[in-house]
Each structure stands twice: as C-alpha cells, then as structure tokens.
Image (cartoon, rainbow, N blue to C red):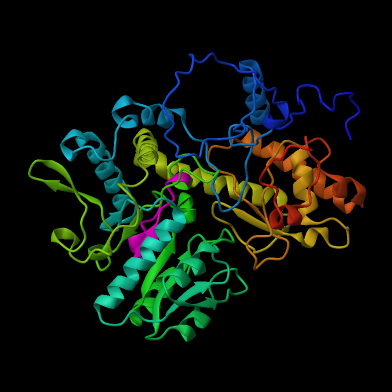
Amino acid sequence: MSDTITGNRALLIEEPLIFEQDSPGRSGIDLPAFQPAAQRLNGLRRQGPIGLPGLSEPQVVRHYTRLSQKNFGIDTGFYPLGSCTMKHNPRLGEKMARLAGFGDLHPLQPASTVQGALELIDSLAGWLKDLTGLPAVAMSPAAGAHGELCGLMTIRAAHEAKGNPRQIVLVPESAHGTNPATAALCGYQVVAVPANARGRVDLAALEAKLDGKVAAFMLTNPNTCGLFEDQILEIAKAVHQVGAYFYCDGANFNALVGRVRMADLGIDCMHINLHKTFATPHGGGGPGAGPTVLSAALAPFAPVPFVVHGPNGFELVEEAGQGPAKQSLGRLKGFHGQFGVFVRALAYILSMGSDGLRQASSDAVLNANYLLARLKDVLSLSFEGPCMHEVLFDDRFLRDTGVTTLDVAKALIDEGFHPMTMYFPLVVHGALLMEPTETESKDGLDRFIAVVRALAARAKAGDQAFFHAAPHHTPRRRLDETQAARAPVLRWRKAD
C-alpha cells in the first residue's frame, strides 16, 4: 500500500478512468453553433446523452501522458521477451513511413500513379527472396499467423493440383501454438512429433510418422527452446522423400538473417515476421506483416495480388485464374498488404545493408549466449551447449524454495525490467525464456544479469514473503490474472 495521502508515488500519479473524470458541459474546444436540419433518422433520434466524457484540454493531455508512463515498451527499457524479438524500431523508418508520397496514398489509385509504391514492394520482395534463397514471395499476409495460413494454403493447393490434398500435418511438440491451429484450419489432422533429450526434433520419431498421408512438416528453426535444429538437412530429406513439403515458422529468423539461406536448408515455405526481424512496430495487435517466401514448386499457387514488371512499368496482378495467376489460390487480404510496415522494413534493410543485417543476427546470438554464460551457475539451463538468439532456463533452481517462475517475473517488474517469457515452451517445466536483441548493450545486459542473480540468491535464501507480494512498486499490485482472462471487465458503467 502507498503511504501517501493521494495514493500517488512521486511522479507516478494515480489515474482514474477518463469516464470517471467527466464533468458535464466541459469541453476543450469551441464548436460553431449547430444549424437546425431536417430530421432524417426516421424516428430514431437519440433520447439521451452519447456518454462521452467532458474534459478540458489539459485534462486530456495529462490523462494520456500519465497512461503512457504506466506502459512498458522497448523505448522504456530492456524487454527480454523470448520468441517475440522485441527490437528497437529506428526512427528513420517512422520518418520514411510518414513521407507524403507513402503516407498519403490510397489503395484504389490507378497503378500508374503509385509506381514508387509498387517499386518499393518489389524491392522489399527482392531482398526477402535474396535473404532466404527462395524464388517467390507472397507479400499480402498481414501477420505471422496469416503468413502461416498462406503457406499451408499453398501447400494444400499444390497437393490438390496433384490430385491428393493428403490428410496430415506433422508439428513438433515445442511449436508455436499458431502452427497446429493453422494446420487444423486448413483441414488437416495435426500429429505431434516429440523432442529428444537435446531439445531438438527426434528424427527417428519423425521418420516413423512420415508416409504418403503427410502433407507437410512444420518446424521453427531456431526452435522455441532457442536451439538450432542441427539435423535439419536430414529432416528435409526425409520429408521430401514422402512427397511432403517442409514449412518453416519464420518467427526466429532474426537469428539467421545473413548467416544462412533457408532454401539451402531444404525449406519449401516460410513466413517472415517483418515486425520481429526487420524492426517495424510490434505488439498491441499490430501493425504486423508476414510475407511468405515460396519454393518453385509452390510459387504458382501464391495468392494475389502481386507486383510484376509490365511494359509500362510496375503492374499489379489482382485476379486469380488467369495469366501469371492461373493457379493462384486467390486473395487472402484486401488490397496489397501492410504497406506502412513495408516502408519501415525496407528502410531498415537499406540502412543496414547485407553486412549490417548479418552483424545484427550475430550480435543477437552473442547477447543470448552472454546471458547463458553469466547465469547458468545460478539458474538451471534447460539444455546444454550454446543457444541461438534466446536462452532457455527452467525452474529447477527454485526447487524447495516456495518461489515460482511467476514470482521471479513479478519481482523483475519492480526492478524496471519487463519479465522474460514464462512457462513457454510447454515442453519445459517452469520455463524462463530470455531473448536479448542485438540492440542491447553489454552495460544493459550486465544490469539485468546482476538483478537476476540477486533475485535467485534471495529466493534460495527463503524469502518467500517478498516474492509472493511482488510487485511492490507498480501502480497496481499482483492481479488475479486467471479471473481477468476468464471474466474481463470490458465496459465502464457509472455507479448508481
């Protein structure tokens, strides 16, 4: 509890809902006098107030400023959320996305008036194809899960063109939840493939499940345990021998850009999270973008629209079933993809260059292994050996302390850090998955390491009361998160 009269904590000021600050008749603006008009609502004219709060301009500014101070973001501090790649978003990308020639476009403009925008889409597509080694890319998917849907739909279309859509998609037990969901949405039976003691796909178990009924195998590489699937060439060979396609979840591409081409690993299809890999905004429901690169065998089934080089410049192919889109699976999204995200991603790529992209991947992997080296003596490392761009610990170091993974995460909030990913992947009990991106300095990592080491020591010393009450210094204390998820209060109602 706060010991201040107001409930404020210095500059951390308590903030009621904006509706609770309503003062009827108050307004921050002056509107011109209303001119009476004929009734056109057929008797449905509003009988009561609309319910919007009345506030002055300073009240509105203070309200949203105070709310922003209660939000943790990558601009606030270290954000080691594993499997999400919370990268710094360079302001250059924001500036480019706001250029009049990009920010003021309308998707229904004639192609002749948006040649620069089409060239930008084409240039970004070229980079994505070069970085993955795959010959085609569908640019329209709006997010990673949408890109997965695109990939599985092209795979299904390719099998159907051969007369057999097949029935099964194989998915590792450590996969992202969207993988089996996407396969099921596309009409497939999902069969899980276990991991081996090294935290990687059990090749023998995979081979035992492969037959003529399998349409595809979906893999994340590096996987969700932060490990490189070092038998990936053998996996690709086994998958292709039964006529199935090899799908890769591109969520962790940030560890591989400029280091390896996915085509060289035998991948047929992969979505790319531009908001994870190429430093565009991430979180809060968007914006996202999930372009999906495709092998030559899958390219004919790519969705429309896509950009082509025509006799009069760049053109859009928008209709399936004709010309270069003769076998296209159709349209997955209105218009032409997430253009503002494309601008930001291409600005990032061009400012980095191929050598900069390679260094970014290298630095991300280096940072994760630095955390591994500095923390493995006080935390419990889930799998031995070096990791890729994220490191996975589990809760064995908390055994018999009465402290849980959740308790440690809540205590981290008090220290000014966003907690790591907790309890995922599910194949590891009490998981703590940490992903320090390439933009984190050694000084920042050292501060985080010092805090984690101190918290581990405090837990092992038996200070259960401290951890069970954490966080101590946030505007709101520990919430009943289960109840909040099951019965969220989504609407404010004025008290009687």
Q: Which residues are magenta?
A: 259-275
Is residue 261 visible from the viewing direction of this image? yes
Q: Residue at x 74, y 41 (%)?
A: 413
Where is the C terminus found, in terms of image quarters? top right
Rendered image quadrant of residue 5: top right
User: Is residue 259 depicted above or below 68 in this figure?
Assistant: below
Asked whether 444 or 326 is in front, the reply is 326
Image-based side of 145 in relation to 46, left or right: left
Q: Is residue 66 left or right of residue 243?
A: right
- Of 451 and 493, nearer the camera is 493
Residue 249 on image: x %, y %: 45, 61
Q: Which residue sits at x=59%, y=16%?
A: 28
For residue 25: magenta?
no
In percent of width and height, residue 245 lies at 36, 72
* x then y, percent, for residue 373: 66, 50
Residue 199 horizontal/vertical position (percent): 60, 68
Q: Compared with residue 204, is residue 334 higher up or lower down, i.e. above or below?
A: above
Q: In the visual, does 49 lie left or right of 159?
A: right
The answer to whether residue 378 shows anywhere in this view is no
| Quadrant in the picture for residue 50 | top right
Q: Which quarter of the figure is the N terminus placed in?
A: top right
Residue positioned 78% across, 34% down in the render: 475
